[in-house]
Amino acid sequence: MAASECPRVRLWRWRRNPLRRRCDVVEAWVVLCGWLLALLGAVFGGIAAAEAVVHSAEQQRAESHRVTAVLVKDAEDPGPARVTSDHLVWATVRWTDANGSVRTDEARVAPKTKAGGKVEVWTDRSGVLPKEPLSETEILLHAVAGGVLAGAGAAGVVLGSAWVVRLGMERRRLQQWAAEWEQLDTPWGWKTG
């Protein structure tokens, strides 16, 4: 009978069979539990990661606010070879924080902006210029990406662990079969393999 004509028996580890061993049933349970735990780990890990990303972004947004700053000196023209994707350049700006202190720092501004020009920059409570907070769309995108990656990682760890357990069980099963063949061969004094 050709290999393609052999019927494929599905779920054979769960059926009663005189050739089925205890290790076959244990392996079936390991596979089933591995897939269930991977699914649960992916869902809960993804949700937890997405919530963490959203919480972090909202916290950053709550701590940041816009201030109007004044350019200290003219912003340079980067030239065509050094144009960035957002078409902004670094320039020194000065602003007054909530405490009334005058601060100076580097910020990204439009090229060729003249000294004394006003620009909007983001600052936090300590007066540091952070990046602009994420928009709602960016938060959603980051949350989805983080959730998918965390879920896939959690599922991968669980499935990898189940695979390692199955490899160990397979090795043990092959050792048991070898020992049984050895017992079968020795009474007659010859080897089959």
Image: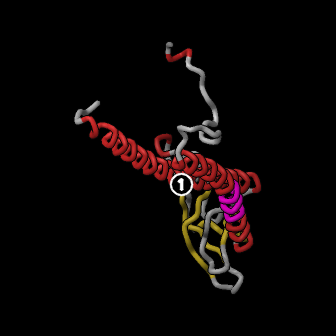
**Depth check: 143 or 157 in front?**
157
Q: In this view, does 132 lie to the left or right of 4?
A: right
State the residue lying farthest toward the left: 189
**Depth check: 169 or 119 in front?**
169
Residue 128, visible in the rendered structure = yes
Which type of secondary structure does the marked residue at label 1 adopt?
helix
Q: In this view, does 181 lie above or below 48?
A: above
Amino acid residing under circle 1: Val
| Residue 167 screen position, x and y as percent | 44, 47
Instruction: Identify the residue position indicated by label 1 in the image.
Output: 157
| Residue 11 screen position, x and y as percent | 64, 37
Picture residue at 54% right of the left edge, 59% below the top: 90
Picture residue at 53% right of the left edge, 54% below the top: 157
Q: Give the range drawn in magenta.
A: 43-53
Picture residue at 51% right of the left edge, 49% below the top: 23
- Does the stretch in magenta take in 52? yes
Residue 118, visible in the rendered structure = no
Main SS, magenta residues: helix
